[in-house]
Amino acid sequence: MYAEEQFLYWKFGVKFSNWAKEVPAFIPKMSGLNRAELSFSWKKVLKKEKKWFLGPVFSHFFI
Protein backbone atom coordinates (compact mmCIF):
# COMPACT_ATOMS: atom_id res chain seq x y z
CA MET A 1 0.00 0.00 0.00
CA TYR A 2 2.83 2.35 0.84
CA ALA A 3 4.57 1.68 -2.49
CA GLU A 4 1.34 2.29 -4.40
CA GLU A 5 0.78 5.58 -2.59
CA GLN A 6 4.31 6.68 -3.42
CA PHE A 7 3.77 5.82 -7.09
CA LEU A 8 0.47 7.71 -7.20
CA TYR A 9 2.02 10.72 -5.51
CA TRP A 10 4.87 10.64 -8.04
CA LYS A 11 2.40 10.39 -10.93
CA PHE A 12 -0.30 12.86 -9.78
CA GLY A 13 1.47 15.03 -7.19
CA VAL A 14 -0.67 17.45 -5.17
CA LYS A 15 -3.91 16.20 -6.77
CA PHE A 16 -3.31 12.78 -5.20
CA SER A 17 -2.41 14.29 -1.82
CA ASN A 18 -5.65 16.29 -1.75
CA TRP A 19 -7.66 13.24 -2.78
CA ALA A 20 -5.96 11.03 -0.17
CA LYS A 21 -6.83 13.52 2.59
CA GLU A 22 -10.53 13.24 1.71
CA VAL A 23 -10.79 9.48 1.12
CA PRO A 24 -10.24 7.05 4.02
CA ALA A 25 -7.77 4.23 3.31
CA PHE A 26 -9.68 1.30 4.82
CA ILE A 27 -13.26 2.11 5.82
CA PRO A 28 -15.13 4.22 3.26
CA LYS A 29 -17.40 7.08 4.29
CA MET A 30 -20.96 6.27 3.28
CA SER A 31 -22.18 9.83 3.69
CA GLY A 32 -20.61 11.12 0.48
CA LEU A 33 -22.19 8.61 -1.89
CA ASN A 34 -24.27 9.85 -4.80
CA ARG A 35 -26.85 7.92 -6.77
CA ALA A 36 -25.77 6.82 -10.24
CA GLU A 37 -27.31 8.67 -13.16
CA LEU A 38 -27.67 5.47 -15.20
CA SER A 39 -29.75 2.50 -14.19
CA PHE A 40 -28.27 -0.98 -13.81
CA SER A 41 -29.05 -3.42 -16.59
CA TRP A 42 -28.35 -7.17 -16.46
CA LYS A 43 -28.90 -7.26 -20.21
CA LYS A 44 -25.98 -4.88 -20.78
CA VAL A 45 -23.79 -6.81 -18.33
CA LEU A 46 -24.40 -10.12 -20.09
CA LYS A 47 -23.85 -8.50 -23.49
CA LYS A 48 -20.49 -7.01 -22.46
CA GLU A 49 -19.32 -9.93 -20.30
CA LYS A 50 -20.48 -12.88 -22.40
CA LYS A 51 -17.01 -14.45 -22.54
CA TRP A 52 -16.80 -14.41 -18.75
CA PHE A 53 -20.32 -15.77 -18.41
CA LEU A 54 -20.16 -18.43 -21.13
CA GLY A 55 -16.76 -19.83 -20.10
CA PRO A 56 -17.96 -21.48 -16.88
CA VAL A 57 -21.21 -22.61 -18.56
CA PHE A 58 -19.40 -24.39 -21.41
CA SER A 59 -16.72 -25.83 -19.15
CA HIS A 60 -19.44 -27.29 -16.94
CA PHE A 61 -20.89 -29.17 -19.91
CA PHE A 62 -17.48 -30.42 -21.07
CA ILE A 63 -16.65 -31.78 -17.62
Image (cartoon, rainbow, N blue to C red):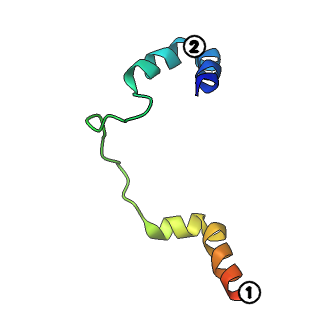
Q: Secondary structure at mark 1?
A: helix
Q: How many marks?
A: 2
Q: Position of residue 25 (x, y in %)?
A: 44, 29
Say which residue appears at 40% left-offset and 27% top-offset.
Answer: 23
Crowding at dot 2, Cα within 10 Å, few <14 / some 14-19 / many 20+, comes out as few
Q: Position of residue 11 (x, y in %)?
A: 64, 19
In-front residue for pair 1/57: 1
Q: How far apart are the alpha carbons under marks 2 and 1?
A: 51 Å
State the residue lying farthest toward the left: 31
Say which residue appears at 68% left-offset and 74% top-offset.
Answer: 55
Q: Is residue 55 above or below residue 12?
A: below
In-front residue for pair 24/43: 24
In-front residue for pair 3/52: 3
Q: Is residue 33 above or below residue 19?
A: below
Say which residue appears at 69% left-offset and 81% top-offset.
Answer: 58
Q: Secondary structure at mark 2?
A: loop
In-front residue for pair 26/59: 26
The residue under label 2 is 13
Instruction: Give, as a three-letter code, the residue at label 2.
Output: Gly
Q: Are marks 2 and 1 in contact (CB under 8 Å)?
A: no
The residue under label 1 is 62
